[in-house]
């Protein structure tokens, strides 16, 4: 299957696998710039994009676009092949690498609180954790982990990790176990000299969060982001295989290949600990991205850093670039949107927002075998470049 640079990076990892006390919520001021007027895209255009994805083979497709209190929830295909139930906005699904934006936001909140610095090294925070096979934690900064310039090996390509996920699906991975597998390999390049998407970076950031705060990344994000924003449908399942109802069923290709597909809804997601294990809904993703871009979660200088493209990111495309845990996408009409793509067994996800946080659009396809890059481009064009 052909993959564009964005999906080669985002899907390249996870598809190989299974395929100090509580904090008060921060209240940061908005960025202070004037916001343009926003309007929802054409009622039919986004639905056409979803219906095209279903015609191409996805069992179902679901989106939500929102400006202020006005929302649309177009859907196509089915949420459950067995019952024929239609996709609905309240349905939960696995968001894959969109998890990274939540983790990055939590890390930057710690920077805002002066409990961490972007120029701190891994060795400063986690001495001795990264220090063999040419991997040097004293040369890797927190910023490099956030923007994928650390050079660390992609742990999902480790044969041992792949074997465990295939033979012991109930195995409960920890971030440290995943990072340890990565540093069994030599780095891809010297820290800071190139760019390569690596899920290892975010599992290591999960370890940083725990070391600095004494809380797991999931607990910290729940206390500082999910609860204050009222994101009741978003969660960290840990090692539980259950996707709570109401749910959008996920589907994967059968091991025999061909046109047969099989259920991929309930499974232990800990193989993606810290980098792709969250559960959410299209509405919660929009609420989070709106709050982030609207300046409610980070002070303006850190938000600007987060949204600044990393030179050399996603080589080979002029549509996508990478900030600090955020994917930037350029629409044909010149509007830049900010969010992330996610891919995990059974699901392909996208969330996006305008720079002021006032216009958002998220969608999910309940398959993992199609390349959704074209769907992403068509969807942001339909939504943010209305005719």
Image (cartoon, grey):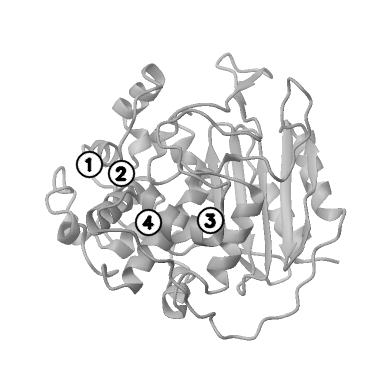
Which label's residue is closer to the chain start, 1 or 2? 2
Viewer-side label of 1, 3 = 1
Closer to the camera in the image, 344 or 67: 67
Q: Can you tell which mark lies on residue 316?
A: 3
Position in image of residue 240 (x %, y %): 44, 30
Which label's residue is closer to the chain start, 2 or 4? 4
Between the C-alphas of marks 4 and 3, the distance is: 17 Å
**Circle 2 residue:** 153
**Circle 1 residue:** 183
What's the residue at 53%, 81% (across, down)?
31
Q: Can you tell which mark lies on residue 93?
A: none
Between the C-alphas of marks 1 and 2, the distance is: 7 Å
**Circle 4 residue:** 148
Q: Examine the image and state in which quarter residue 220 appears.
A: bottom left
What's the residue at 51%, 41% (across, down)?
11
- Mark 4 and mark 2 in contact (Cβ < 8 Å)? no
- Mark 2 and mark 1 in contact (Cβ < 8 Å)? yes
Q: Quadrant of the N terminus?
A: top right
């Amino acid at each position: 299957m052909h993959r564009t640079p964005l999906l080669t990076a985002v899907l390249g990892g996870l598809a190989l696998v299974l395929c100090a006390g509580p904090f008060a919520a921060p209240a940061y001021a908005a960025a202070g710039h004037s916001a343009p007027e926003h309007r929802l895209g054409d009622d039919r255009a986004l639905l056409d994009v979803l219906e095209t994805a279903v015609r191409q083979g996805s069992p179902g497709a679901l989106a939500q676009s929102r400006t202020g209190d006005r929302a649309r929830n177009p859907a196509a295909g089915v949420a459950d092949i067995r019952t024929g139930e239609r996709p609905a906005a309240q349905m939960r699904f696995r968001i894959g690498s969109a998890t990274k934006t939540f983790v990055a936001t939590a890390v930057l909140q710690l920077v805002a609180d002066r409990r961490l610095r972007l120029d701190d090294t891994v060795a400063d925070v986690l001495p001795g954790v990264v220090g063999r096979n040419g991997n040097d934690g004293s040369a890797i900064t927190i910023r490099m982990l956030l923007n994928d310039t650390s050079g660390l090996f992609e742990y999902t390509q480790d044969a041992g990790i792949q074997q465990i996920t295939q033979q012991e699906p109930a195995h409960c991975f920890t971030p440290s176990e995943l990072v340890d597998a990565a540093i069994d390999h030599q780095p891809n390049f010297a820290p800071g000299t190139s760019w390569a998407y690596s899920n290892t970076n975010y599992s290591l950031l999960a370890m940083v969060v725990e070391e600095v705060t004494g809380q797991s990344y999931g607990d910290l994000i729940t206390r500082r982001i999910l609860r204050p924003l009222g994101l009741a449908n978003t969660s960290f399942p840990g090692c539980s295989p259950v996707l709570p109802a109401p749910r959008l069923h996920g589907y994967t290709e059968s091991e025999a290949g061909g046109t047969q597909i099989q259920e991929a809804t309930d499974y232990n997601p800990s193989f993606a600990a810290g980098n792709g294990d969250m559960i959410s809904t299209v509405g919660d993703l929009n609420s989070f991205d709106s709050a982030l871009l609207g300046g409610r979660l980070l002070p303006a200088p850190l938000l600007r850093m987060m949204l600044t493209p990393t030179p050399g990111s996603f080589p080979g495309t002029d549509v996508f670039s990478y900030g600090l845990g955020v994917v930037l996408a350029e629409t044909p009409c010149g509007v830049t949107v900010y969010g992330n793509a996610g891919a995990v067994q059974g699901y392909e996800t996208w969330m996006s927002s305008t720079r002021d946080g006032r216009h958002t659009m998220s969608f999910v396809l309940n398959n993992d075998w199609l390349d959704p890059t074209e769907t992403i481009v068509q969807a942001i064009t339909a939504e943010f470049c209305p005719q």
